Image (spheres, grey):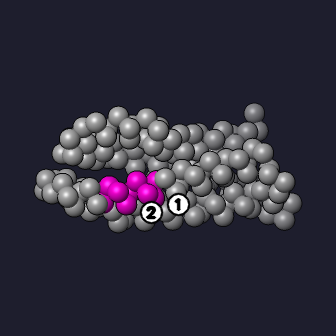
Amino acid sequence: MTSHHLMLFLHVCGVVVWVGGMAFAWFCLRPAAMQLPPDRRLGLWAGVFRSFFPMVWVSIALILVSGVGMLIETGFTRAPVAWHVMLLTGLVMIGVFASIWFGPWRTMQRAVDAEDWARAAVAMNTIRQRVGFNLGLGLLTTGIATLGLGI
């Protein structure tokens, strides 16, 4: 095993947790949660995010450290263009996640704790939209990484 293999493994682990978690939430948890009354649904989401969002921060660290490590190892100028595109889309995804963490997630936590379901629902809708955007960008990034897409 080389350091490149280890970095690639850590990179893929981070992506699996982050993008896979978003896919599970969007396509499985979200439809099932819609069957619950608002107070239970929003309480469920708050509990899910309390567990998932810290995992996303760890995933971001793994992805950044391993991705930049592989870029440095290969050389920025010798790295495939797809890697540079991946870096760009990954940085956008991190920005979107940070906007969730420092914005509507904080609002949702306070609203759920106060049982202000209307305010929690507005925050949850914003989170849903941003997660949907990030999921699409994550899938596009995965395609660029694995298929090259002519880049």
**Is 49 placed left or right of 38 in the picture?**
right
**Residue 19 in the image, given as x and y percentages of width and height:** 54, 45
Task: Indicate the secondary structure of the residue bearing disc 2.
Answer: helix
Q: Alpha carbon of mark 2 to alpha carbon of mark 1: how far?
A: 6 Å
Magenta span main SS: helix
The question of residue 94 being in magenta is answered with no
Foreground residue among 90 and 57: 90
Q: Do the residues labelled 2 and 1 touch (CB within 8 Å)?
A: yes
The stretch in magenta equals: 123-131
Q: Is residue 10 visible?
A: no
Q: Residue 94 carries which label?
A: 1
Tell me the SS state at disc 1.
helix
Give the quadrant of the C terminus: bottom right
Q: In which quarter of the image is residue 81?
A: bottom right
Residue behind mark 2 = 98
Which residue is rendered at x = 69% and y = 42% of the image? Answer: 8
- Graded by Cα atoms within 10 Å as few (under 14), some (14 to 19) or many (20 or more), the crowding at tag 2 reads few
**Amino acid beneath label 2:** Ala
